[in-house]
Image (spheres, rainbow, N blue to C red):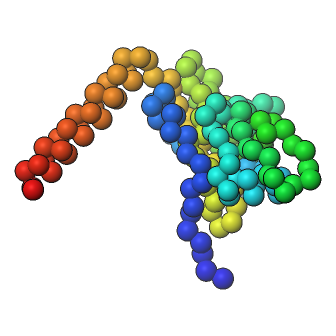
Amino acid sequence: MGRRADTVVIRNRRARYDYLVLDSFECGIVLAGSEVKSIRAGRANLQDAYARVEDGELWLHGMHIAPYEFSRAELDPTRRRKLLVHRKEIETLARATGEKGVTLVPLRVYFKDGRAKVELAVAKGKRAYDKRRTIAERDAKREAERALKGLRD
C-alpha cells in the first residue's frame, strides 16, 4: 500500500491576517466517523476556533463541522474536540499561552496517512497598524509583480 500525500481540506485564512504566528505544531484530533466524512467533503469551518489546555489535556473549541447528511448520530457541530499531542508538547503550549496576548489558533485541517490532523499555531494577536502594514506589503508585492510582468510582455 503506497503512502498518500497530505491533503489539506480546511484552511483558516483569517489566522495569518489576525495573528502573528510564532510556532506551529501538528496534532491529531479525536472525531466521530460522520465528522470525518464531513471534513473530507470540506464541510467544516475554523473561523472562530481556538485551542486551550485544560487539566493537562489539549482541547479545540469552536470548530464547526456540519452534520453528515447520511449519519444517524446527532452530534453538536461546535462541540469541543480533544487534540492529541505528546505530554511535553502540552506543557510547552501551556507555558506559551501563559504569556499575555498569546493564544492557540488552528491554521488548517488535513489528512496524513488517512488520519485527520490539525496544524495548531502559537500566535500573538496583531494590532490594527500591524494589519495595515501587512496589507500594504501585500499590495506593494502585487504591484511589483505587475510591473515585472509588463516588462516581460
* Quarter location, residue 74: top right
Q: Residue 83 at x, y = what percent? A: 73, 45
Residue occupying the point 73% across, 49% down: 29
109 vs 24, nearest the viewer: 109
In this view, the residue farthest toward the front is: 69
23 vs 82, nearest the viewer: 82
State whether residue 57 appears in this view. Answer: no
State whether residue 47 appears in this view. Answer: yes
Q: Residue 128 at x, y = what percent? A: 41, 17
* Quarter location, residue 132: top left
Q: Residue 103 at x, y = what percent? A: 59, 28
* Quarter location, residue 70: bottom right
Q: Is residue 7 above or below residue 86?
A: below
Q: Residue 114 at x, y = what percent? A: 68, 66
Q: Is residue 139 above or below residue 117?
A: above
Indicate left or right for 137 with 146 as reference.
right
In this view, the residue farthest toward the left is: 151
Q: Quarter of the image containing the C terminus?
A: bottom left
56 vs 36, nearest the viewer: 36
Indicate left or right for 17 with 2 as reference.
left
Residue occupying the point 63% across, 23% down: 98
Residue occupying the point 57% across, 18% down: 100
Residue occupying the point 55% across, 34% down: 122
Q: Quarter of the image containing the N terminus?
A: bottom right
22 vs 39, nearest the viewer: 39
